[in-house]
Structures are given as structure tokens and as C-alpha cells.
Image (spheres, helix red, strand yellow):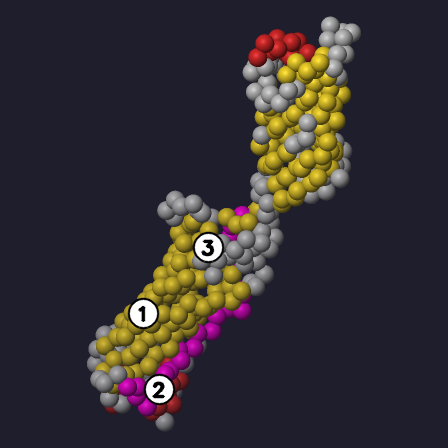
Amino acid sequence: MRRRRLAAALAAVAIAAGSAVLLTNGSATAAETIRLEKEQTIYCNPTLPGLPEVRGYSAMYVRMDVPASGVVGQRSAPIPWQASGVLQFDLSEGSVLRTAFEQEGATSYLTEYEARFFLNEGYRELVRLRFSGETELSTGQARASGSGELPGLLPTGAGRDRVAIASNYHSVQITPRKADGSPTSYGTIQVMCVHSPDIPAWYWYDVVAAPTSTEHVVTARTETAGGATDLGAGSLTLTKGAAGAVTGELALPQTGTAAPPLLGVIPAAAEVLLTPGPVTGTATGLTAPVTVTIPGLAVLGFPLFKDKTTCTATTTLTLTPEAGFTVVGGGTLTGRYDLPAFTGCGAFTPLVTSLFSHPGNTVAITTS
């Protein structure tokens, strides 16, 4: 009968008295984190017929370094945590619990905590924190502590204030132990804690869409003072970042042929090569540095120079998506660029400059 009454005393119905959450800035790292601290206190107030009421409480403290933001479909780094717990019951000399434990030969007791948390919106992932500590029977306040890592957060939807972590409850069990470390006949006694059925969220963060990257096969055509030039096939790789920024690479490796009339009447033929640099911008407008090379030039069929890689002019190419163009689906981009004076063409530099160095040159790039 005495043992049943003791078990009933410890299997008390507990009422969650409240919790507090503290957010502070974590140390600056490549992936920004926030220091998240939580305290949860649970009071136990059982009423036992024929025995004095056993009063006590359990307080749990949890600290985590959580990601400051998330990207859809990308799991964050594991979340380090530290936790401690304090379990307070009346274990003074002559108390109900102290007397019962001592009669069984106990000199200490093991306190084990388990805290339950749900990760990610929709409470999709249940995780448990477990930690423990050994306390002398003569000490009224049991302490437990531990540390570890939780799985990283894995958001599935973009938006502001997405639920990342929700606190369910924590439970406690104690095991009275003899001097040799063996348990008493009481075994492990569960301290029951009944919480509200609600699962309150206590950490939210902003989640952005994952970058979208697509490679397109393109054909290009440019219109310069030297006339229309078919630049053949190339490639366009675009990546739309989490914040809407677009980056990419435009490769136009083929050389086209222009027919600029010398002095307006003398037929000439020039090789034209466009070499764009990194593409940056947004879905509504892109820019890229571009080097225009004239590798060869002939007049009346007579070559003035050929295979010259140094005859260049560098400028900025501005690209505008036509209606219906998307990063993933592609479409048509139209662009403009001004050509300054050329350099590196040897004795023919003034001639090349006179033929090609004009504003308002255009380019059309179409995906296929």
C-alpha cells in the first residue's frame, strides 16, 4: 500500500505554469544563426488521501542556435542544443519521499528528462531531447543537463514567419538508487505531466524560394554598323536566386560575318565575335559586359588581317526579356550595346573603328 501511494504521489498531474522565449543574436557565421532560449516550468500538486500533499515543480531550460532564415527544400545545418532541468520535491528529513526511499536503501536518485519538439511547418518532424543527472538523496533539488544536435530545419514553403520549431512538452522520471548504483524495488518512477493539447509554436523564420537554374540552347543575331550578322548557336544558363536576382552565363562561341561597306561603296567582309561576361539582373532586365572582337577583315576579297584576337572593343550589353520570357521556359531576349573605339588591330585600328564603333547596336537571342 505504501509503495502504491508513493507511485501515485510521483505520477502527479502537473499543470504547465508557463514558458518564456528569449531571442538573441548568435555569433556571426557563414550561415547566420539566432540564439534561442526557452524556459518551461511545470508545477506538480498531487493530493493523496491519508498523506500530506507532495508539492514540487520541474523547470526545464533549453538553448539552441537556430538558422536565421531558410531556403525551400534545403535543410539547414544541424542545430546544436544545450539543456538543463531542475526537479524540486520535498526530500527533507522525515518527508514522505525521503522516508520511503531510505527504507528501500536509496542514497541517491537518477533524474531523466525528455523534451519533445516538432520541427518545420505542419509539425512534420518529431524530435526528442534527452538528458539526465544524479542527485544525492539529501539534496532537495535534482539537477540534470545535457547537449547534442537536432536535425537541421527543412522548409517546404516560402514566406514570412513560417513555423520552424514548436514545443510540445517535457516529461521527467526518477530512479532511486542504492549506494552501489543498483535501483531499489521502486524501479523507475514516471512523473506524469499533463499539458494542454495545443502545440504552441515558439520559433518562426522567413523562408525564401530555392534558386532555379536552367540551361538553354540559343541562337543569336546582331546588327551593327557593319550590317546584320548571324552569330550561330550558343548557350544561356540562368539562375534565379532566392531574392529574385538573376545571374548566369551567355556563351556565343561562333564567329559571324558582317559586310560593312568601305567608304559606303567598297565591299568588305569582317569576322565578328561577341564574348559576353557574367550576366546579372532580374527577370525584367539583364546586363553583361561584352567584348566584341574582329578577328579578320578583307576588302575586295583581299585579307587585311586574319586570326587576330587582339582587335577588340569592350562595352556593356543590356538585355530585355520579350513578353513570355521566363528563366525556366526561356524565350527571346533583345539587347543593345554601344561600341567604343577598337584597340589592338595594328595599322588597321582606325579603319575598324570607323566601320564598327557606333552607338545603338542591337542583338537578339532566342532559346530553342
Q: Give whichever of 204, 342 is nearer the camera.
A: 342
Q: Any mark on residue 176, and which? A: none
Q: Residue at x 36, y 64 (%)?
A: 147
Query: Which image quadrant: the N terminus?
Result: bottom left
Where does residue 136 sit, x and y in percent of width and height? 23, 77
The amino acid marked with disc number 2 is Gly
The amino acid marked with disc number 3 is Ala
Disc 3 to disc 1, C-alpha distance: 26 Å
Q: Which residue is mark 3?
A: 77
Q: Is residue 330 above or below residue 132?
A: above
Disc 2 to disc 1, C-alpha distance: 19 Å
Query: Which image quadrant: the C terminus?
Result: top right
Numbered range of the magenta stretch: 182-207
Q: In the drawing, does residue 141 fall left or right of residue 151?
A: left
The amino acid marked with disc number 1 is Ala
Where does residue 205 sit, x and y in percent of width and height? 51, 50
